[in-house]
Image: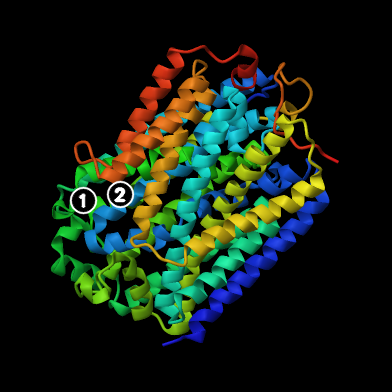
Amino acid sequence: MSSKRKLTSYQEKLAQATREAKATFAALLATIVAWIVLGFGLSGLDVQLFHTPLWVVGGTIGTWLFAIAVCVFLEKRVFEDIDLDDVAEGDTGGVVLAEGGVAHE
Amino acid sequence: MNSFAGLLPVVVFLVFALVAAVIARQRAKARAKDGFVAEYFIGSRGLGAFVLAMTTIATYGSVSSFVGGPGQAWSIGWGWVYMATVQVTTLFLLYGILGKKMALVSRRLGAVTVIDVIRQRYQSNALAVAAALVMITFFATTMIAQFVGGAKLFEYVTGYSYTLGLCIFGITAILFTSIGGFRGVAVTDALCGVAMLVGIGVLAWGILSAGGGYAAVMDTIATNHPEMMEPLSGGNMPIGLYFTQWLLVGVFTFALPQSVVRTFAYKDTKALHLAMVWGTVILGAMMIGVTSLGVLSAGVLTEPLEAYGGSVDNIIPQAIVSTLPPWLAGIAIVGPIAASVSTVSSLLIAASSAVVKDLWLHASEARGAAVSETIVARSSQIITLAIGAVVFVLSIVPPDVIWRINMFAFGGLETAFVWVLLGALFWKRANATGALLSMVGGVAAYCVAMALGFKIFGLHQITIGITVALILMVVGSLTSKPTEERALEPFFG
């Protein structure tokens, strides 16, 4: 499940977002490896599926399915639900907010 | 020959999209809790999973995905589809790397545009102005390519004039963007995404029927062009091209500002997670599907390129005309026209936000002049309309080879924003000097290399732009004063 524990502080939420970004980068590397193996890696085989070279099936549909599996893994095992609404109110961390803001009527 | 049957589905679709945008805007007006600007430019951060996924896909998937790319696939073969598959990474990269942190930071800062975030992170107006100008320039280039691609396709398939096609869907796109704002764009993007999938399905049926079934089509290709069944396509698809396409349409796409702004706009992280999974399913089907149609067209369009007007941009329109009856051809072209319209509308609203929010409102605030929301509301719609009108007029004289123009703008935007955004969110030491040098120097190096046709190891000029931008970001940041701690708090806690 994506919801494991409730992250309450802004600091914790940022740290979680950074963890997720790193995991996503690792997922990209894994997908690149899968793309190479399933495409170029299979291109030496003289095998066809439904009149289609095996490397085409592996490199396209295989990579696509791998990417979907990666997304499911990230969603289930890495990403966490974060409450986004409570970060906008109250403390702004001492930052001067947008100079280009609009004057609401 | 003019085909009213071919015209009708396009008109029906565009009217439907216009009505949907108006309804979305009317409903949103009633519940706009954060004021006009937040509603008009990011839909009050209320997008659910389906609309988030579809608006990101439809923004990314352009007419070049439907016309130029498959046209190249007709010429090169399955290697082009293999290359196009790298696009399955784009959604999870965007949502996974920037999605959550941008949502947190933009809410914390009350930011409505990507440039809002950049301005506050780097505390630099010069950088914000440079970013706005880069965005507007490359967005305009991309929009022209979309208009031209859609109108050429329309002319080829329906027999009506290029200008009529441009008027019909160009004016509709500009109108529904001006009236509907971001929420209208997101809703029509979802409709466009569905239309794109339907278009792919219809054309696939046409090509396979005309070619005697999948097996017969594949056998024809293997017999006529055996090199099209190889990943390197007999030398037409070199490794260097795979590498640079990975960068251009894969790895660095998460930095495209028109996509990044969508990470400000979703309502909760459940929506983001679902959009990532289902968006990857849909995007893969769309990109692999539509590019495969280009290859399969080689099984029915067997003459040399000269027989089809000498341009690969004519292949998909020719496939539609050759394999489908007029009424189905009309349905098939709704797909690429929807791709064109959805990309234009997303870029138009983002360009408008750069002018209204990042340049005009910021300058007003700096002078201490508050601008009333009524004036902002009217001006935003007028400016959106005006930018659209300028792009429309520039599109009346058509350039050639759409996918290259699109790739030029992709490369420029990625060069400008990738290190600036990554530095903003993940590298404390990144500062205004480094960011400004990276954006301006990187884009300049990229454009000069493109203009001169200069390449290193035969690789696309994106490699030059990205490398120069990275070096300048690192050297500029490390040799000048760090950003003040208080400005870093929303980004690093």
**Where does label 1 land, which residue?**
B237
Residue nearest the viewer, comparing B375 with B247: B375
Mark 2 lies on a secondary structure that is helix
Q: In the rendered image, is residue A66 in sight?
A: no
Residue type at numbered disc 2: Met
Place of residue B207 in the rendered image (x, y in percent of width and height, measured from the top left): 34, 74
| Residue B146 in sight from this viewpoint | yes
Q: Residue at x 72, y 58 (%)?
A: B24
Q: Quadrant of the C terminus of chain A?
A: top right
Q: Residue furthest right?
A: A105
Which residue is under mark 2? B83
**B33 over B233 or under it: above or below:** above
Q: Quadrant of the N terminus of chain A?
A: top right
Residue situated in front as seen by the camera: B325 or B131: B131
Q: Earlier in the sequence, mark 1 or mark 2?
A: 2
Q: Is the residue B460 above or below the residue B84 in the image?
A: above
Residue B352 lies, in percent from the top left, at: 62, 48
Closer to the camera in the image, A70 or B13: B13
Tag 1–tag 2 contact (CB < 8 Å): yes
- Residue at position x 71%, y 32% in the image: B110
Q: Give the residue type that dot 1 points to.
A: Met
Same chain letter for marks 1 and 2: yes
**Eyeballing the image, is B310 above or below B279?**
below
Say whether residue A69 is left or right of residue B208: right
- Residue B478: % across, % down: 43, 13
